Amino acid sequence: MFGEMGRWLMIAGGVLFLVGAVIFLAGRIPGLGRLPGDIAIQRDGFSLFMPCGTMIVVSIVLTVVLNLIGRLFR
């Protein structure tokens, strides 16, 4: 029981580490966050940033990568 729970905790920790590393390194990709379709509104005491274009690009890339990984392990 504890062995299986420990294994799942290690897997969850590894996934969290990978997600954190991707988010950390995503800030270094030139142009990411400033694509056409990203909405930025700045007014006195208010700022809004909605990265719609970036979300679409990241979604497409993740879909392709996860499909390729799924086909490798099938």
Image: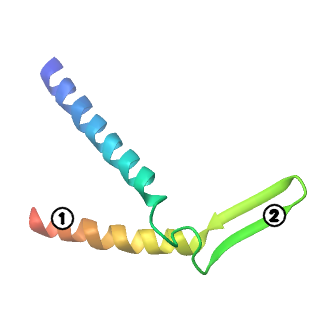
Q: Which residue: 10% across, 61% down?
A: 73
The residue furthest bottom is: 36
Quadrant position of the C terminus in the picture:
bottom left
The residue furthest right is: 44
Vertical arrangement, residue 69 with respect to residue 31, above or below? above
Quadrant position of the N terminus in the picture:
top left
Q: Which residue: 43% across, 69% down?
A: 58
Image coordinates of residue 35 in percent, x first then y, are 57, 77
Image coordinates of residue 17 in percent, x first then y, are 33, 41
Where does label 2 land, which residue?
A: 42
Residue 1 seen in the current view: no
Foreground of the two, 1 or 25: 25
Query: Can you tell which quarter of the image residue 6 is in?
Result: top left
Q: Amino acid at mark 2?
A: Gln
What whole-number distance in Å separates the C-alpha atoms at marks 2 and 1? 40 Å
Q: Amino acid at mark 1?
A: Ile
Q: Which residue: 41% across, 55% down?
A: 25
Where does label 1 land, which residue?
A: 69
Mark 2: give few (<14), some (14-19) or many (20+) Cα within 10 Å.
few
Q: Which residue: 46% across, 61% down?
A: 28
